[in-house]
Image (cartoon, rainbow, N blue to C red):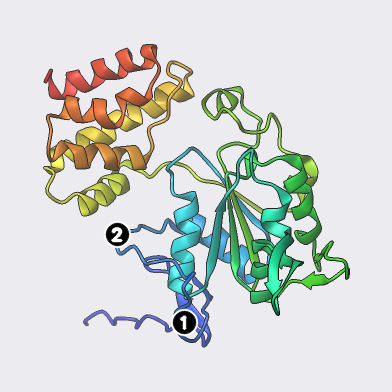
């Protein structure tokens, strides 16, 4: 007797399925907003992370993704936004980011021919009012005054009171969500070494307001090979496999504190693209080795020569 094929269930009304996972998230109906990210047809959703991000979206939990540079933290949120047709406001935090960027400030403006100070709302206010997803990149590099602003709105029912002379209250739209990415929450000493400029230890009150914290690991070797080969199809698959093996050797040496450099999928892709034009060692110098300190450079150069020979 022939086996019966069970048809795939359609997602419930108002939801969309994340490709390859069977997981659904709410979908925003209507025309595509300018802030909806572009879809990456080669992006590989990893089910274990999608499940947790989907939980945060569905249950209105603030979500922080933690992991080394280039492991796909920001792109996971952006690609989920692309699938859901939902606007995503992405902002990179750093030591120069101040509260006015998010809350707003008085700005000289000409009104009816008269120049006067008008309060202009910041991007946090706009995201809250319009129901966008707010993606705070490198939150572990933000100054404490900025983090204290977010503590108000990350609470259940949190709101923002503006210093605009009227005490305007900004409340969260039902579709507003807050995501953050971080290379470290300041716990591991090696993180403070390779991510200079991040906080020594993230404020516990800030961490406590994220109901979903996800540690994102690098892509599994077979999946990383698939992604690189899809994005750089002109590169021989054996070269792609060698790149991934070298990347994983480096990651293991970092874990064992034998090296002090990361090797992200982003660097793998940069190297693979350069290898379509240059010898692998020369391409490695351009995209990887010249970013390292002298000791790490020598070690990794030897590894590359072992696989590809000298240029």
| Vertical comparison of 16 with 55: above or below | below
Displayed quadrant of residue 141: top right
Secondary element at tag 1 = loop
How many residues crowd mark 1 within 10 Å: few (<14), some (14–19), many (20+)? some
Image quadrant where one finds the C terminus: top left
In this rendering, is residue 232 above or below 157? above
| Residue matched to label 1 | 11
Task: Tell us which disc is closer to us: 2 or 1.
Answer: 2
Q: Position of residue 225 (x, y in %)?
A: 25, 45
Which mark identifies residue 42?
2
Could you say where residue 136 lies in the image, as x and y percent from the top left?
60, 53
Residue at horizontal 26%, vertical 18%? 301
**The disc label shown at residue 29, or none:** none
Q: Nearer the viewer, residue 126 or 206?
A: 126
Q: Residue at x 51, y 79 (%)?
A: 27
Q: Is residue 162 visible?
A: yes
Image coordinates of residue 51 in percent, x first then y, are 53, 61
Q: Is residue 18 left or right of residue 6?
A: right
Give the side of residue 64 with respect to residue 48, left or right: right
**Labels 2 & 1 near each other (Cβ < 8 A):** no
Which residue is at the front of the view, 307 or 300?
300
Q: Report how far apart the C-alphas of labels 2 and 1 lie in the structure.
A: 22 Å
Q: Which image quadrant: the N terminus?
A: bottom left
**Can you tell which quarter of the image residue 124 is in?**
bottom right
């Amino acid at each position: 007797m022939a086996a019966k094929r069970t048809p795939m269930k359609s997602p419930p009304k108002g939801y969309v399925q994340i490709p390859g996972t069977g997981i659904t998230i709410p979908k925003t109906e209507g025309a595509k907003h300018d802030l909806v990210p572009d879809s990456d047809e080669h992006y590989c959703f990893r089910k274990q992370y999608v499940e947790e991000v989907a939980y945060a979206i569905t249950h209105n939990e603030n979500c922080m993704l933690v992991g080394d540079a280039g492991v796909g933290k920001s792109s996971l949120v952006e690609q989920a936004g692309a699938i859901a047709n939902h606007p995503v406001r992405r902002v990179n935090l750093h030591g120069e980011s101040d509260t006015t960027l998010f809350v707003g400030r008085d700005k000289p403006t000409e009104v009816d021919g008269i120049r006067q100070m008008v309060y202009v709302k910041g991007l946090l206010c706009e995201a809250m009012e319009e129901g966008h997803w707010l993606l705070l990149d490198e939150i572990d590099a933000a100054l404490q005054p900025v983090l204290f602003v977010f503590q108000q709105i990350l609470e259940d029912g949190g709101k923002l009171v503006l210093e605009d002379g009227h005490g305007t209250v900004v409340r969260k739209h039902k579709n507003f969500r807050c995501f953050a990415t971080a290379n470290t929450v300041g716990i591991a000493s090696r993180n403070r070494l390779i991510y200079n400029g991040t906080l020594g230890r993230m404020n516990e009150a800030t961490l406590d307001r994220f109901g979903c914290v996800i540690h994102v690991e690098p892509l599994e070797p077979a999946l990383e090979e698939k992604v690189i080969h899809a994005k750089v199809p002109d590169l021989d698959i054996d070269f792609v496999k060698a790149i991934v093996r070298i990347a994983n050797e480096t990651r293991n040496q970092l874990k064992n504190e034998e090296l002090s450099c990361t090797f992200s999928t982003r660097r793998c892709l940069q190297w693979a693209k350069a290898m379509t034009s240059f010898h692998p060692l020369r391409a490695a110098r351009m995209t990887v080795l010249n970013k390292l300190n002298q000791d790490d450079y020598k070690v990794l150069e030897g590894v590359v020569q072992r696989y590809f020979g000298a240029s």
